[in-house]
Amino acid sequence: MPFKKFTDYLLLEKHYSEHTVKAYLNDLETFSVFAKEHYGYDDIKEVNYGVIRSWIVSLVDSGIANRSVNRKVSSLKTYYKFLLKTKQIEATPLAQHKALKTSKKIQVPFSETEIESVLELLDKETGFEGLRNKLMVELFYATGMRRAELVGLKLTDISIAQKTIKVLGKRNKERVIPMLAPVMKTLQRYLEERSQLPEIKDASYVFLSAKGVKIYETLVYRVINNYFSKASAKLKKSPHILRHSFATHLLNEGADINAVKELLGHASLASTQVYTHNSIAQLKQVYKDAHPRNSK
């Protein structure tokens, strides 16, 4: 495997997730095939920027969005930085590269009313899967955790006595998040239902399927999308929007941004500042109340 040392570096030194490393590897292999087929390069260590630029053009021509192209080029950039660091090359071919322009996506968080509507829907659900889905929504909104963090949550990460959850975030960084009383109640009801499953294969994990195996990320997306489609007309209805809602609602209520940063598990404040915009409704209200011409 030509990229073994690089993937080991990402996993062991940079503490990237297996999912991220797999995406990087896929990008490198795709570029390697392109460089071989079009320019005869057996090793992408030797390519110049012209080859990379040609690959970028081919990706754009094939209809891949600029944002996705930038992510693929970012994989190459990380690889060439690794080669520089390990003294396998003297200069990176991407030194002068500028990312393609992308439109800024404003992700609109769910309103408190939309979230309450979904929780009311989930209150009517019964049985194991109904309680599991309710706990998913409550945990996302009450903790702001990521989808992968929820899927990887283990029973040993929960302290009922302390009313906290230990979350293993990006690059294996741990953080402890307090749990609200209603979430604790749902958790305990879910664990009772969980214990009644005919067979439990992945016993250490909190969230299981009805067959007793650890749930997967696509299932989580489907659950969130399904329930929020009934309560919201927003285009994007994903677990990440619930994380976004958690942060936005806390900040709107006056929470300290540094505290929100810690709860979200962000490495830098810049990541948290994405959520500092108010909801569209609030902005409209402020504008309506404060603009001098509104009273005329």
Image (cartoon, rainbow, N blue to C red):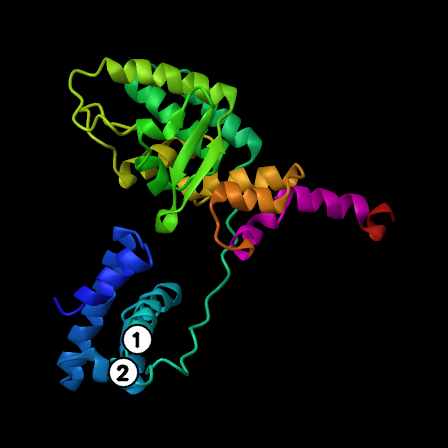
In the picture, which quadrant includes the N terminus?
bottom left
State which tag comes first along the sequence, 1 or 2: 1
Three-letter code, disc 1 = Tyr
Residue 145 left/right relative to 217? right
Helix, strand or loop at label 2? It is loop
Residue topped by disc 2: 89
Can residue 246 be seen from the camera position used here?
yes
Q: Is residue 122 above or below residue 94?
A: above
Whether residue 291 is situated above or below residue 98 in the rendered picture = above
Residue in front for this viewpoint, 130 or 193? 193
Q: Amino acid at mark 2?
A: Ile
Q: From the viewer's perspective, tell me whether residue 265 is left or right of residue 171.
A: right
* Residue 252 image position (x, y, % from top left): 64, 40
Q: Magenta part mainly helix, strand or loop? A: helix
Label 1 or label 2, whichever lies nearer to me, is 2
Q: Is residue 109 visible?
A: no
Residue range (magenta): 270-290
The magenta stretch spans residue 280: yes
Q: Are marks 1 and 2 in contact (CB under 8 Å)?
A: yes
**Picture disc at residue 29:** none
Q: Crowding at label 1, few (<14), some or many (≥20) Cα neighbours within 10 Å? A: many
Q: Residue furthest right?
A: 296
Q: For mark 1, give the secondary structure.
A: helix
| Residue 145: x %, y % from top left | 43, 39
Picture mark count: 2
Q: Nearer the viewer, residue 99 or 263?
A: 263
Q: Residue at x 33, y 74 (%)?
A: 81
Dividing the picture into quarters, in which one does residue 97 lie? bottom left
Say which residue label 1 marks: 80
Q: How far across and how far down the image is residue 16, in percent?
A: 32, 55
x, y (%) of residue 38?
17, 83
Residue 146 within the magenta-colored segment of the rendering: no
